Structure formats: structure tokens, C-alpha cells
Amino acid sequence: MNSLIDRSHRWIADCLQCDR
């Protein structure tokens, strides 16, 4: 289950970078 959270964290970081 930790893998799912890790993937979510990476997705959010990617979204933040895309926003910039």
C-alpha cells in the first residue's frame, strides 16, 4: 500500500512542476 501513496506523492510533485 505504501507504493500507492508514493505514486500519489510523485504525481502531485509532477503537477506542481507542470503548473510552474
Image: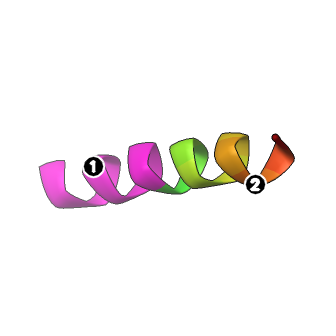
For residue 20, side relative to residue 1 (left or right): right
Q: Callout 1: 10 Å neighbours few (<14), some, many (20+)?
A: few
For residue 10, side relative to residue 12 (left or right): left
- Per the rendering, the mark at residue 20 is none
- Nearer the observer: mark 2 or 1; the answer is 2
Q: Residue at x 84, y 45 (%)?
A: 19
Rendering coords of residue 5 (x, y %): 32, 47
Give the answer, above or below, for where 9 lies relative to 1.
above
Is there any visible trace of residue 1 in the rendered image?
A: no
Rendering coords of residue 15 (x, y %): 69, 51
Give the answer, above or below, for where 4 lies relative to 17.
below
Rendering coords of residue 9 (x, y %): 42, 43
**SS majority, magenta:** helix
Disc 2 marks which residue? 18
Observer-nearest residue: 12 or 17? Answer: 17
Q: CA distance from mark 2 to mark 1?
A: 18 Å
**Quick one: which residue is furthest to the front in this view?**
20
Task: Identify the image's colour scheme: rainbow, by chain, secondary structure or one colour.
Answer: rainbow
Give the answer, above or below, for where 7 lies relative to 19.
below
Q: Callout 2: 10 Å neighbours few (<14), some, many (20+)?
A: few
Q: What's the residue type where badge 2 is placed?
A: Cys
Disc 1 marks which residue? 6
Task: Point out the stretch of residues depicted in magenta.
Answer: 1-10
For marks 2 and 1, the one nearer the N-term is 1
State which quarter of the image contains the N terminus: bottom left
Q: Residue at x 81, y 40 (%)?
A: 20
For residue 18, side relative to residue 10 (left or right): right
Q: Residue at x 15, y 48 (%)?
A: 2
